[in-house]
Each structure stands twice: as C-alpha cells, then as structure tokens.
Amino acid sequence: MLIILLSASLLVWIAVLIDSLLGLKSLDRLEDTDTMTEGPLLSVITAARNEEAKLAESLETQLRQSYKRIEWILVNDRSADSTGSIMDHIQKNDSRVKCIHIDSLPSGWLGKNHALYKGYRESSGELILFTDADVLFKKDAFSKAVHYFSKNELDHLTAAPSLTGRSFWLNTFIAFFLFGFSYYKRPWLANNPRSKSGVGIGAFNMVSRHSYEAIGTHKAIKMRPDDDLMLGMKIKQNGLRQKFATAMDLIEVEWYESLIEAFKGLEKNTFAGLHYRISMVLFAIAGTFLSQVLPFFSVFSTDKMIFSLSLANILFLAAVYTIITKRMSKFSPLLFTVFPITALLFIYSIIRASILTLVRGGIVWRGTLYKLSELRNKR
C-alpha cells in the first residue's frame, strides 16, 4: 500500500512540476511594463476596520503615486480605534480623498464586502482598484498597472505582492502557503483566455467599472470571506479578460505579525476554501500528509523501493517548491529544509480553523460572527 501511495504521489508531483514550469512562464512582472501618468480616472477603494497601526503608512504610499488621475474612497467599517480619525485627517488635507463611515452592517453581508460595495457606490472612476489597508506601494505601482491594464485591454488585473513576515517560522509558513496556493489554485490559468479558472488577490484587484457591474458587483459575493478570490472567479466565469501578474518590487504586504496571527487570520477562509464540507477537510488533511509529510519519514525505510520512491518524491517536491518560491516570493528556497514541519503546521491550521468554525457555528471576522448556515446558503 505504501508503495502505491508513494507512486501516486510521485506522479502528481511530476505533473505539478511540468504544469508549474509552463504556467509560471506565462506570468508577467508589472515592474517590466512602462508607466502611464495620464489616463482614465482610477478610483482606489480601501476599506478598513480597526487598522490604525498600518493605515496611515499605507495611504501615504498611495497618495505619492506618479499616476495623476486618482480619487480615493476610504471606508471606515465600524472601527473602534482611530481608523476613522486618520481617514478624516487625510480627507481634510487632500481634496482627492473622500471618507465614508459605516456604523452598522446590513443582514446578509460580510463587513468587508459591504464596505467595498459602499465605496464603489461613491466612486466615479472608469477603473476601480480594490486594495487593503495594510498594503505598501512604490510610487510607480499604479501608473505601471494602468498602462498594463490598458495595453492588454483587460477587464481585471490582479497582482501578487511581496509577502513579508517578522520571524523565521512565519516566513516558512508564508512560503508554504504560496507553494500550496500556486499548485492548488494554479493562478497562471487566469492568463489563459480559454480557461474559466480565475484568481483575485486582496492587495490588488483592478477592474473596469463596466466589468465590475456586469458580474453583479460585490452583491454577487456578499457572503464570501474569500471575496478577493471570488471576484476574480466571477470575472472569468463571465468570459471577461483577466491577467494575473507579479509585482514583488512594487507592492508589499506584511501578511501577519506572528505565526499565531496567521492561524487566526486563516480561520475566516479555510473552511470556505474547502466549500464548508467536512469531506473536503479530511481530503485536504490526508492529501497534504501523504504527499508532503509521509515521504520525509518513509525515506528512512530499509526497503529499497520505498526509499527510492520517497527520495524521488522529496526531490520533485523540492523542485516545485524552489521554482514557485523564487517566482512568487522573495524568500529563499532553502526554507525547504524545514518543509515537513511547515506542512504539519499547515495541517494544524486546517484542523484548527475547521473545528473553530463548527464549534462557533460560523466564522468570526473582525469581531463579527457570521453564521455557518448563512455562509453555506449564500456561497
């Protein structure tokens, strides 16, 4: 049985390596495109709840952009800290900025999705950029993105930022997350016009106003905790033109401050990503363990066939991990040296998020409980 499992796993990693090599070649770097300082009006919509620690720095990098035609819609979503005051201060000193303060959440909406939708309602731009309140931008990020968007006649552009962490183990977890996201979601398929598989990243989702309205706006995904991903999915499902690019030198996000915070952050979308099904949770746990942990134990077997298959699995895993890490992050591929430990941490995060969701009867996001029954009915 072990030989069969290792053989099947090896075939999977061979296929993943080939797919990744071909797919990653299709990704453009926004850094390599030209800048455009004049063009269509861009509405930047940033929703924030209790983001006083990072909001000011993020907005400062946005307001220094070289692209000229921008308006900002800042949405304070029921914050209990100084988030609203920071937004009001910036609005007072910059005529391009408009603030919205939300005091209550309507039934049937997740907070962030509702806030972004309210921001859209107050915007005027032909292009809309949805971004988070903790994202840092280099000054040409918007001008390069708009140029790339216009040149390729896109309906939607999403860009992968450089994710950073403060500790070794957090960085290994981020690298593993990017590895898993890449081979599972295959984001490069967004660049294939024939594919219906789409992708969206919360740090940078640029969409044309017409296309955003054509897919039903955030109303169509109002109960999705993975709203950024689902926005991209809706774009592709409607046959619109999408591109996924990397922007490691233009956009930066501190993913979480600690590994514990990462576990907490994944509570909101882990179960959603597995379609709120226990069977999918069990499949994800078993699949991760058998394909990404087991070979590191079975490689010590005295059976030559088991040893050879285990070693082959590890080598192909290392190859996939290396090419994805080098293309999708600024981390060193040497983090692979603790790969099985990180895989076990990832399994723990799946188990933790799923159990907490079931025990609570829903997900807790930014202090609000969203019932599992509503999330399942409106996915």
Image (tube, rainbow, N blue to C red):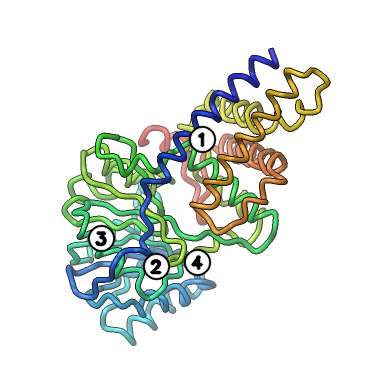
Image coords of residue 236 (percent x, y): 27, 40
Which image quarter is the N terminus in? top right
State left or right for residue 309 relative to residue 144: right
Which image quarter is the C terminus in? top left
> Residue at horizontal 26%, vertical 37%?
237
Tag 4 secondary structure: loop
> Residue at horizontal 27%, vertical 47%?
242
Q: Residue furthest top?
A: 1
Reading the chain from its start, which is encountered first: label 3 or label 2? 2
Reading the chain from its start, which is encountered first: label 4 or label 3? 4
Q: Which residue is mark 1?
A: 17
Residue 16 position (above or below residue 367): above
Image coords of residue 331 (percent x, y): 59, 57
Image coords of residue 64 (percent x, y): 36, 80
The amino acid marked with disc number 4 is Asn
> Which label sits on residue 50?
4
Give the mark toward the camera: 3 or 2.
3
Tag 2 secondary structure: strand
State left or right for residue 341 relative to residue 224: right
Q: Residues within 10 Å of mark 1 (few under 14, many from 20)?
A: many
Give the mark toward the camera: 1 or 2.
1
> Which label sits on residue 120?
3
Q: Which residue is mark 2?
A: 76
The amino acid marked with disc number 2 is Asn
Q: Residues within 10 Å of mark 3 (few under 14, many from 20)?
A: many
Quote the CA–CA distance across marks 4 and 3: 21 Å
Quote the CA–CA distance across marks 1 and 3: 40 Å
Quote the CA–CA distance across marks 1 and 2: 43 Å
